[in-house]
């Protein structure tokens, strides 16, 4: 890694460390009790002491998040490709996608939990609904943004719809798809957590949202912060992974993939 890159990576680490030190200092100097605002050191200790249960819940949340993201990727790309090939199909189905996007997940999660027997499947559907639209919308915009001159060239050579999609539309849509994935990654995590809050699920096979609810009922504020820390770190990890994917797919030929 070059020196400018090391320096760029060091800046957020230093700012995060400074924020944590300031938080720790404020709690200790003002004597704020843990049930109001726990110090970062207490949150870290609580996370370590409850690592087994929180780790199982974290893995469950990860499973829901990435399952929903994969479904959103497959469904969004497939439907956007169909819309790009058929305006009639887009006019018929796009309003349903918009309706799912604008309906709050907390409003439809209880209905999904009624109609779906498996809690895991219901949470997966809820997270998928939240993550689906950015992939669909961004991919469709990318498919529609191909160079018109190249479109005319494909027509001149008598390219079929599938050849046009494979060799022209898909490469032009790839940067937009990656941008949609960056949005959907965070939304899938939010959808998984919010859906579990709406479900009010409890027990061993549950995610971090259930640990947060249990800690709030018992007024275990440090444990709530420990679970929230895992949620935040997961979101940061998803963001970093999406940036790495962007560099891998676009770094050599598209400006958006370069540092």
Image (spheres, rainbow, N blue to C red):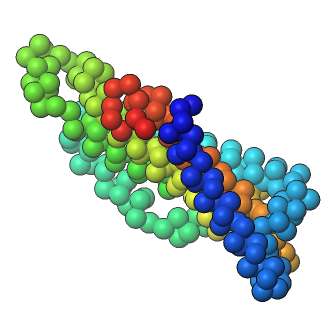
- Would residue 40 appear left or right of 176 to someone viewing this image? right
Quadrant location of the C terminus in the rendered image:
top left
Closer to the camera in the image, 229 or 74: 229
Displayed quadrant of residue 241: top right
Residue at image coords 63%, 53% = 13
Specify whether 140 is left or right of 237. Answer: left
User: Left or right of 116: which side holds 51?
Assistant: right
Quadrant holding the N terminus:
top right
In the figure, 108 relative to 187: above or below? below
Q: Position of residue 223 (x, y in %)?
A: 82, 68
Relative to residue 247, is residue 54 depicted above or below? below
Pick the front one: 78 or 22 = 22
Q: Residue at x 81, y 50 (%)?
A: 55
Residue 85, placed above or below residue 192: above
- Rendered image quadrant of residue 115: bottom right
Residue positioned 14% across, 26% down in the render: 151
Can residue 122 be seen in this snapshot?
no
Q: Quadrant of residue 34?
A: bottom right
| Residue 179, percent from left and from top | 40, 44
User: At which x and y percent is residue 216?
Assistant: 78, 76
Q: Position of residue 213 (x, y in %)?
A: 76, 71
């Amino acid at each position: 890694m070059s020196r400018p890159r090391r320096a760029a990576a060091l800046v957020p680490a230093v700012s995060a460390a400074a924020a944590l030190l300031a938080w720790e200092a404020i709690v200790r100097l003002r004597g704020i009790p843990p049930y109001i605002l726990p110090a970062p050191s207490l949150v870290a200790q609580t996370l370590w002491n409850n690592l087994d249960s929180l780790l199982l819940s974290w893995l469950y949340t990860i499973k829901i998040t990435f399952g929903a993201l994969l479904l959103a990727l497959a469904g969004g790309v497939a439907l956007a490709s169909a819309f790009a090939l058929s305006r009639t199909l887009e006019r018929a189905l796009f309003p349903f996608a918009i309706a799912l996007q604008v309906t709050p997940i907390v409003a439809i999660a209880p209905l999904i939990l009624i109609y779906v027997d498996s809690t895991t499947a219901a949470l997966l559907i809820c997270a998928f609904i939240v993550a689906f639209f950015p992939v669909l919308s961004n991919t469709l915009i990318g498919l529609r943004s191909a160079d018109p001159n190249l479109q005319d060239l494909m027509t001149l050579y008598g390219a079929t719809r599938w050849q046009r999609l494979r060799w022209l539309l898909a490469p032009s849509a790839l940067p937009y798809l990656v941008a949609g994935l960056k949005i959907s990654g965070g939304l899938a995590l939010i959808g998984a957590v919010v859906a579990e809050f709406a479900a009010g699920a409890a027990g061993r096979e549950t995610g971090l949202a259930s640990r947060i609810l249990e800690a709030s009922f018992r007024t275990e504020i440090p444990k709530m912060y420990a679970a929230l820390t895992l949620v935040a770190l997961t979101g940061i990890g998803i963001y970093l992974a999406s940036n790495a994917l962007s560099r891998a797919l676009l770094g050599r030929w598209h400006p958006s993939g370069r540092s």
